[in-house]
Image (tube, grey):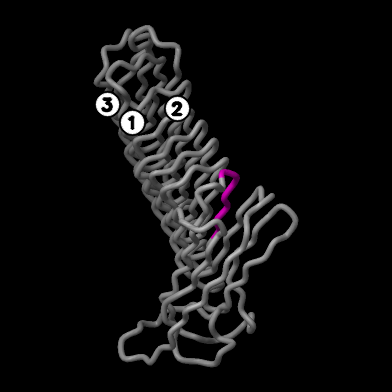
Amino acid sequence: MVGKNTLTRIVIVTAVVAVVSLGIAALIAFLDGGFDQGQAGRMGRSVDERKTLPLDAIELLSISSVREDVQVVEGSSADVEAWLHGTVGAGGRDDAPRLSVARNGSTAEIALQRERRFGLGPFWNNLVLEVRVPKGYANRLSVKTVSGSIDVAGHLYGGVSLIATSGELRVGPVKTAELDMHTTSGSIRIEEAAAQKATISSVSGNVDAGPLSGDTTLHTTSGNVRAAFSAMPARIDASTNSGTLTLRLPAAAGFSLDARSTSGDISCKFPITIAESQTGGARHALHGVVQAGSNTVLAHTVSGNIRIER
């Protein structure tokens, strides 16, 4: 049983983690020349840099940025194409990031490098790193950013890993064996993903996903979780400390449901054979079997409602 004092501590810890994460992201972006003080009335300098790299014998495509948004799409060339474009605040040539594309063993590395690691400018940029992946590439993709957003769409991968400290993650439609997405302070949006296994988490931000397929783990510390499934996976494990949790499952799905909330209501739109039901007080629970299914649905919240829909 979680008491009022424990809930208060959870909220305080969540707030502290989010504030510290934002502070770290802002400091890194500032030291790297990405601190945005507003572009109105400021002179800027255009950036337009392109590089390519063959992906033969490449097992991992690794992309990284600090503040710049990253967009990964399917291309028509036989090589991976990287394009850095946009505008940076007026300053010396060393103030703007430079596009680096290189092969390191079986890894293709696309990164934005800065000549002055601890510069004070430029004070803004709206740069975008656009990466076009050849249709024939079917191995792993990894994208990391500190305070930029990440968009990945329209391709078949062997695995996808997306990580942001303070930025939004957006995916779909993609097909991949494994999908891993994590952001400390930002939302996650999945338009469509066919993954055998998906792990999706946010410390402070909403998760909006679907349709999904395959075993899925969803978690947010402070935020709502909404996920829809096109096919019933063997296992769904969804949780949030503070927020509403909504799972939309196929109408013909059969599964074992274990839904528990310390402070929140639980509803299930499926006909269910109830093994355990508790309502009120400091514990709410619903456990039972839907349509004699052997699949598993775990839905847990500390402070939030749980909705199982079809």
Tell me the kind of residue under disc 3: Glu
Read off the magenta span. 138-144
126 on left or right of 107: left
Tell me the kind of residue under disc 1: Leu
Q: Which residue carries the number 3 mark?
A: 309
Q: Which residue carries the number 2 mark?
A: 236
Label 3, secondary structure: give it: strand
Spatial distance from mark 3 to mark 1, Cα to Cα? Answer: 6 Å
In the rendered image, which quarter contains the N terminus? top left
Residue 218 tag number: none
Residue 141, magenta (yes or no)? yes
Residue 28, by quadrant, is: bottom right
Is the C-beta separation of discs 3 and 1 under 8 Å?
A: yes
* 83, 235: nearer the viewer: 83
Vertical comparison of 253 with 135: above or below? above
Q: Residue at horizontal 44%, vertical 35%?
A: 194
Disc 2: CA contacts within 10 A as few (<14), some (14-19) or many (>=20):
many
